[in-house]
Image (tube, helix red, strand yellow):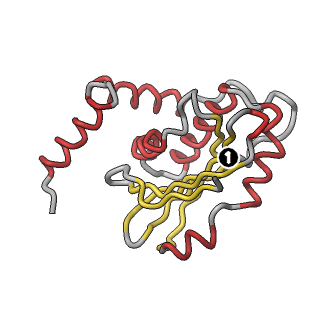
Amino acid sequence: MVDRLDIDTLNRRRLHAAGQSGSKHVWRMVALLLACLAPACVENPADDGSPSDVLPVVRETRFDYGEADIRARLPDTLLLHECVRSYAAVYSERLKETFFNRMSQKVVLLGLDALKFLQCIEATGQQTPEVISLPYLGERATYEGRECWILEFTWGLSKEDLGHFRCFVMDIATCDTLYYLTCR
């Protein structure tokens, strides 16, 4: 059993290894949270007139998934195909940022911990500009008895290649990856 001091020490080391001090990291997360809570300035992230209230989806379930459940259920192919069909041609970093902001807003509307959600998103590495990806599903659930976020993304090696999937099961308490699934 790891005591609290050890977890704090590990977290500080992880932050230091990432090149951020603890206080900078906290302020960055607070700024991101505040940006997510602000009302969106545009109706449609793609600016093409299509409805965009559906994607990305954020939901809370009471299901306790196991590995077999995750393998059978992921990815959510209906949402994956809808995301690719609707947004692959208009992919941009602005669209990606809008999707992450919308997910955070939906987390807040569900009454869930947005800061923990953002920490789990950050731990996936999918929000960085170097990664071409769009989040299309965030599900708050449990995995083998541990509270988690199940996060699904479409990704590609280029904008034209967008359409692959990455699925992360992230431990809410530690932001560790409990399970990972991808098509490549």
Residue 137 image offset from top left, x and y in percent: 62, 52
Q: Nearer the viewer, residue 20 or 118?
A: 20
- Pointer 1 local density, CA inside 10 Å: few below 14, some 14–19, many at least 20: many
Name the residue: 44% across, 68% down.
143
Q: Nearer the viewer, residue 159 or 92?
A: 159
Q: Residue 103 at x, y = what percent?
A: 59, 43
Task: Identify which residue is drawn at 49% across, 64% down.
Answer: 141
Foreground residue among 181 and 48: 181
In the displayed structure, would residue 121 be above or below residue 177? Answer: above
Provide the residue designation for mark 1: 154
Query: Residue drawn 26% across and 29% down?
Result: 16
Residue 27 lies in quadrant:
top left
Q: Is residue 123 above or below residue 142?
A: above
Q: Secondary structure at mark 1?
A: strand
Occupied quadrant, residue 14: top left
Give above or below for 12 relative to 71.
above
Q: Residue furthest right?
A: 49
